[in-house]
Amino acid sequence: MAVVLLLYVVAEVAAVWAVSSAIGFLGTIGLLLAGAFLGSWLARREGARAMRAFVATARAGKPAHAEITDGMLIALGGVLIMLPGFVSDLAGLLLLLPPSRGLVRRAWLRRIEKRAPVGYSAPGGVIVVDSEVVDEQRPPRSHPVIDAG
């Protein structure tokens, strides 16, 4: 992780140095500020859009996995835009734009699905399936309202 952070810092410094050499110091500062303002506006707009999509999906009674993931990616993109530097601005912009965010979301979900255990047997006869615990040794509890009859 430390190597990744070091590479990120080196890439940011190199990018700022290259842009500053090409357009000058004040132009670089102006470009960084313009990126921060544009990015914050885009993050606010996309965040509101993701929230409306989440609410509509939740009201329809459907799972809102994609909407929640979009919201998290938009938040990460907004944080990256606020960091000073061109590399973080580019990464944040890619997370804020819907087409590239969709690609990142699909790749992220594929990786999570590969790493997450779908069903495994824990000690004591307890089976965990999709984060729901099922105990094989006890019969399922009935609902008290249904049994009150």
Image (tube, grey):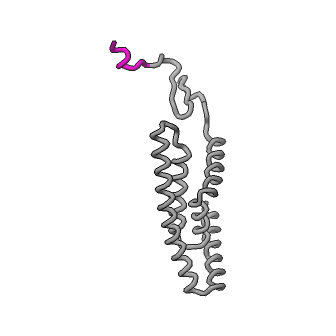
Q: Nearer the viewer, residue 130 or 63?
A: 63
Question: Extreme top residue here?
Answer: 149
105 up-or-down from 117: above or below? below
Q: Position of residue 148 (x, y in %)?
A: 33, 14
Q: Is residue 146 magenta?
A: yes
Compare residues 78 and 83 and report the one nearer the observer: 78
Image quarter hosting the C terminus: top left
For the image, the number of numbered tags is: 0
Q: Residue at x 51, y 31 (%)?
A: 132
Q: Residue furthest left?
A: 148
**x 57%, y 84%: residue:** 27
* Residue at the image position 56 percent from the left and 27 percent from the top: 127
Chain part drawn in magenta = 141-149
Please tell me whether residue 6 is drawn above or below residue 131 in the rendered image.
below
Position in image of residue 80 (x %, y %): 54, 65
x, y percent for residue 105: 61, 51
Instruction: Let me know if residue 107 is in the magenta part.
Output: no
Residue 145 image-quadrant placement: top left
Q: Nearer the viewer, residue 54 or 112?
A: 54
| Residue 100 image position (x, y, % from top left) | 63, 58
Quadrant of the image for the N terminus? Answer: bottom right
Relative to 125, is 42 above or below? below
- Name the residue at 51% across, 48% down: 68
